Image: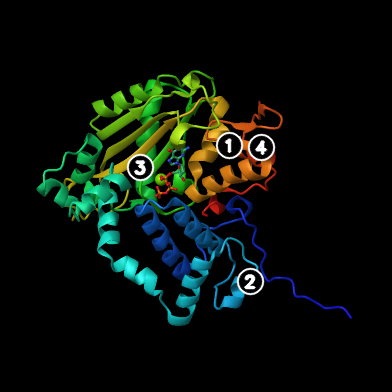
Amino acid sequence: SLTLINPPATTVKSYACQRRTPLKHHNTFLTDALEILAENAEFNENEGRSVAFRRSASVLKALPHVVRGMDDLKNLPCLGEHSVRVIKEILEDGTSSEVESTRQSEQYQAMKALTGVFGVGVKSADRWFREGLRRPLDLIHTGQKLNLAQQAGVQYYNDLNRPVTKREAVAISHIVEKAVNAVLSGAIITLMGGFRRGKEVGHDVDFLITHLEEGAEEGLMPKVLNWLEEQGLLLYQKTTRNSYLESKDGPARPPHNLDRFERCFSIFKLEKGKEGSGTSLNTSYDSGPSWRAVRVDLVVSPFSQFAFATLGWTGSKLFERELRRWAGQEKGMSLSSHALYDSKQQRYLRANSEEEIFAHLGLEYIPPSERNA
Ligand code: DGT
Ligand code: MG
């Protein structure tokens, strides 16, 4: 006789870049918990473990319903033993003891606070933690040697840890447009990162700048920064040069994952009220009464790489990581924010749009608003 097997209620593909992940989903109570463990694994420099928790959380973000019981996890990919144990505990008890003890732990809290300083990575934070430091102000009290980024990070700590609103991002867009247009006409400025994915708030504002005329964008960054500097709009900036043409190992494999675009990590001084809101109640410790500090990332790309740069700077970080993993493991290709290299054909594949890149990769096109993996 025939055995009828119910098809799984939901099928979820295993790579995040094969799935649609909206910004708002149904399982925040689980994904927040898993992401605490992912973050803690990062603090302990255990990348494998961190990615495993992030992948588990991401699968739950793509589900069209609330997870109510263990049955709902059947047939789902990427859920490792540890993640399943945590989910089970939350479903049964309402909380996970491991997540709660992590949240309460001195190490997690100190690492979170110290890495929350702009310019401070896990390595420095961990060293300071071992030396007994716990909070950003301890860096000052104990007279730690700080680089310029970290000095700015401490100085503007409160502002930089206050979420940037969409409204503020738009106000910054206008400033960046004005600055770019003042030094080069016809440049195209696009808001990237979380805001392009539809987020209402972000930790920074990301921009990609290009020009239809290949080469016209060269040397743009210092000019833009000069203009901003002259207007008194910059509190901090550090530019990294475009080393793309100088590299030997090909554009698809940037060392340490760092881009070779002309890129600038900066802190803008944003006048309040400029963002068009009536609320200018200022309780911040570091900004003046009339302005706040905002982290802004600027990237300049030649037009020939614009589609790759757009895809690479839209995120989410996990979505990007999964795209590269898909390209490498499933397609024998190498994807970066500059290019797509096909190892079998031994050639670069051109693209003028994100849609073309997805097509080269054999993936269904996923719009930015559904890349919130
Ligand atoms: P948030 O925290 O609200 O700013 O969220 P996102 O998604 O805007 O994250 P963010 O600003 O750290 O980065 C924006 C996107 O740019 C991110 O999703 C991936 C990409 N990205 C960040 N840093 C790099 C980098 O060094 N190289 C490349 N190629 N992409 C990067
Ligand atoms: Mg961002």
Residue 187 in the image: state x and y as whole percent.
Answer: 47, 26
* Residue at x 58%, y 36% (from the top left corner): 335
**In the figure, is residue 35 to the left or right of 123?**
right
Identify residue for label 1: 335
In space, the residues marked 1 and 2 are separated at their CA atoms by 32 Å
From the Cβ of disc 3, is ligand 2 less than 8 Å away?
A: no
Disc on the earlier residue, 4 or 2: 2
Mark 3 residue type: Ala
Of residues 227 and 312, the one drawn nearer to the viewer in this rendering: 312
Q: Residues within 10 Å of mark 4 (few under 14, many from 20)?
A: some
Identify residue for label 3: 171
72 relative to 230, above or below? below
Of residues 292 and 87, the one drawn nearer to the viewer in this rendering: 87
Mark 2 residue type: Lys
* Residue at x 45%, y 28% (from the top left corner): 260
Disc on the earlier residue, 3 or 1: 3
Q: Residues within 10 Å of mark 3 (few under 14, many from 20)?
A: some
